[in-house]
Amino acid sequence: MSEIPAKATKSTGSQNPSDRARPEAAEDSGLGGATRDSGAARDRTGGDPTGRASEGRASGSRSPGSRVSGARGGDAGVSDGDASAVGGQGAGGAGAVAGRSTGGAGVMGGHGTGDSMWQTSPPGSMYDYIKVASFSIGPDGLVDQWSLRAEQLFGITAARAVGMDPIEAFVDPDRREEGQRKMAEVLDGREWTGVVPFRVPGPEGVEGLAEVYVMPTTVEGGERAAVCIVVDVRTLRQIETDLAASQAIFGQSPFGFLLIDTDLRVRRANQRFASIYGGEVDDHRGRGVHDYLRSPEAERVEATLRRVMETGDSITDMHITGFVPGSEERRHWSINLFRVHSGTGRPIGIAWLATDITARRSAAREAAAARRNLALLNEAGTRIGNSLDLETTARELLDVVVPGFCDLATVDLYQGLLVGDETPPGLADGSAELRRVAFASAVSDAPFVGGPAPVSVGAVHHYPFNSPCADALRTARPQQVPEDGSLIQSTLAVPMVAHDTVVGLVQFSRTKGSEPFGERDRGLAVELAARAAVCIDNARLYRREHERALILQRSLLPPGDPEASGLDIACRYLPGNAATEVGGDWFDVIELPGHRTALVVGDVMGRGLRAAVAMGELRTAVRTLALLDLEPAEVLSALDEIARGLGTPGGVQSASRTTAGRPRDKDLSEVYLATCVYAVYDSVTRRCTFANAGHLPPVLVEPGESALMLDVPPGMPLGVGGEPFEEVEVELPEGALLALYTDGLVESRHHPLDEGLQAFVGALTDPAQPPTALRSDTPRSLEDVCDHVLNTLDTHHGEDDIALLMARVQGLPEDSVGDWTLPREPRSVGRAREYARARLQAWDLEPLIDTAELLVSELVTNALRYGEGEIRLRLLLDRTLVCEVWDAGLVQPRRRRARDTDEGGRGLQLVGLLSAAWGSRRTPRGKTVWFELPLPGGEHGLTDPAEALLSLF
């Protein structure tokens, strides 16, 4: 029997089973190794080939306490074993592992007889991961020693385990017979190693799998006993699986994997990492961050590694930039860092997992560039084309591209397009004249590539035939302008093409330090130029239509300053600005028989050429209806029918039938609506009759009074139909001011209609006017009044056309009117001639006496023969001489051509030949037949009565 040195027994007081068992385990393990080598029962007590066992025996016999410590020494002996040997064994290698471990302990035990100190397992030992335990069996086959690790493995305390039969306690009943046989062989002196399934006694019955190494031994008295070393097989298999998984991660992972130690040096690298940086895996051991990355990126990564090592905080998706050996291409990686710990929780390094994201970064840059381009195109679609002005549209393009797309930009448009030429150059030779309409720069005082000298905005120039800009205009394709050594690095000359027509050229330039234009930039530049070109072409077409509509509208308005009998007329017409289409506002002054005047102001709803044409048609219809000498309400009723017929292919009659038979088509683009106010002023009586079709009310300013809006019933707008119009008659005092206007004068986006009307009324009665104001004794001219109104009100908004018609009442003096009532008898003809002669002599119109007597005689004779009731003769002198004959008959005279054999029927023909104009009109009590003669010395000379009579035959 081997004996344990006395010095070794001092360690039994330690609570750590590994520490307190190591001295005894040294020689016990040596004894066990000898027994395994014999393979049979032995009577000798030594067996260590080196002789160290004999040294143990020389120390004397072992006490029972020492034997107990030696029994637990099997547990401790394994603690100092080779961890790598344990990790490399399978399920059947536990015995070998134990043997090597105890053998090593024996060696240390041999040296322990001197002054050597027992060493503990360093932190991070393999025994921190595997489960190894030991216990001893006495000669009676019962457990007599139970280590602390056995308590941890089996979950049974030593007090409970000692005295238990291990076969009965841990082996299933169907395997107990075989277990008893093996136990008998062991107690007979044979070693045994095997894998044994076991279960823990108790109601829970936890099952496990253990590899058991049983070594025979001898106790005092020569009885046979055994020491058992147990290894948890499932833990070993888990470690084996973990090692395989770790090897797979390092060997098969597609990502670069590094294990960095506490000194921030590479301890281990996988093949993927080595394939990127070259060399074998072992070549990277001991390298630092500076061996892979350049400064300052290396300093940043090294600081991050230190922070992870110190704090334990992991880093996720940290982007780093570097270069691989043999290439200057910049590479990008995403790394994840986390601290690695041992089984005891001690930090042992940092795990580095790197993914190459160079392609992803490139794709992200491409996607970001595409998003920027889309955002730029979206901004261009939002900001370009808000104005219908050519220069403004060009500036809007440059506002979008500078500095977001380029550093400098210019826009040149063909001069012919700007001046209204209908034959644009198109794909000409590219050297036609252009005008620079816009320039933008994000660089102060930067020279621009585009010619020998910079071209200022507004200047007219052209490009040489062989220049890239001329080539771009000629081929309608973008061209790269060569660098000239200045601040400009890259320039694109892009033609502006709209509807297959080149309208101009835009140049985009980037200065040095910016990225040169690429293919994607070229495509974006073409798209931006095309969008701007379409907007510019639309603005050009709109300008052309606007000018045409404006010319048409002005041609339909009264030319010059209108004149009227008994009225002083002033008018203003202000079209909308170039950004708004021409409206349908109009005004007219129509002279009527009897020195009466029709005043008209109207507004066609809508804009553009269509509204201008509709206005022209309505104005012509108003003049025609006015010459029929209809009442104002009748004129508006007829005008309403005409307006309804404008949107119907069949005209007025078709519109009436459509309204009566079925509902009208609801296409609003074919509906013509208009508002209109129509007034007839009689200069003899100074009475004015109004009729309103949905228009703003007239404003009247009487001398010495404030301005007021006349209460004229607003009927329905023209074109609606179905409602009659009402008339209002107002007597106007001498010197009164009458104002007719459209809504553009009093209404705008920022000024409601009510506020505009109040401002208009206030402008007409402004107490701050100069001494020659309306209410003073010397009224100022109507031209000054119109200017004062337009300057006072907000008339520069340009949102709508403005029409203003103002008239000051100047009635005919009493001595300019001759009025007589004649009885219905033949003598009245001669009396009428006498009245006419006497009044003309009083007016110093002797040259008109003969002609006037003849025509008055004819009209009075017709009234006697064909009329009814009393006869009234009236002579009116103003700019012309007017003679009127009234009677109660309703039959209108009709002029006819008499045959050569007829004795009569030539009276009205004679009136038509000798007078400047003649006609008839209905009155509330009959009819009136009139003629007009020009005054002597006027533009129109008098007709010789003799020649007129001879022309009848």
Image (spheres, helix red, strand yellow):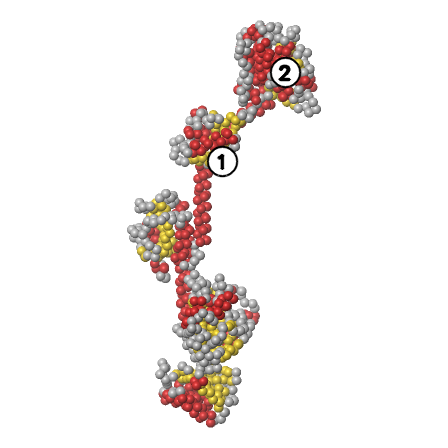
On the picture, is 223 further left or further right than 712? right
Within 10 Å of the Cα at label 2, are there few (<14), some (14-19), or many (20+) other Cα atoms?
many
**Residue 317: numbered disc:** 1
Closest to the observer, 423 or 68: 68
Residue found at x 40% / y 57%: 392
- Whether pointer 1 and pointer 2 mark residues with C-beta atoms closer than 8 Å, the reply is no
Q: Is residue 640 above or below residue 18?
A: below
Sequence-first disc among 1 and 2: 2
Q: Quadrant of the N terminus?
A: top right
Choose top left, top right, bottom left or bottom right for residue 358: top left
Closest to the observer, 836 or 626: 836
Choose top left, top right, bottom left or bottom right for residue 434: bottom left
Q: What residue type is labelled 1?
A: Asp
Residue 869 position, x and y percent, is: 52, 89
Q: Which amino acid does label 2 sit on?
A: Phe
**Residue 135: numbered disc:** 2
Q: Is residue 114 above or below residue 201?
A: above
Residue 213 position, x and y percent, is: 60, 15
Residue 285 position, x and y percent, is: 45, 25
**Residue 727: numbered disc:** none
- Which element carries disc 1, helix, strand or loop? strand
Q: Can residue 942 be seen in this view?
A: yes
- Residue furthest to the bottom in view is 827
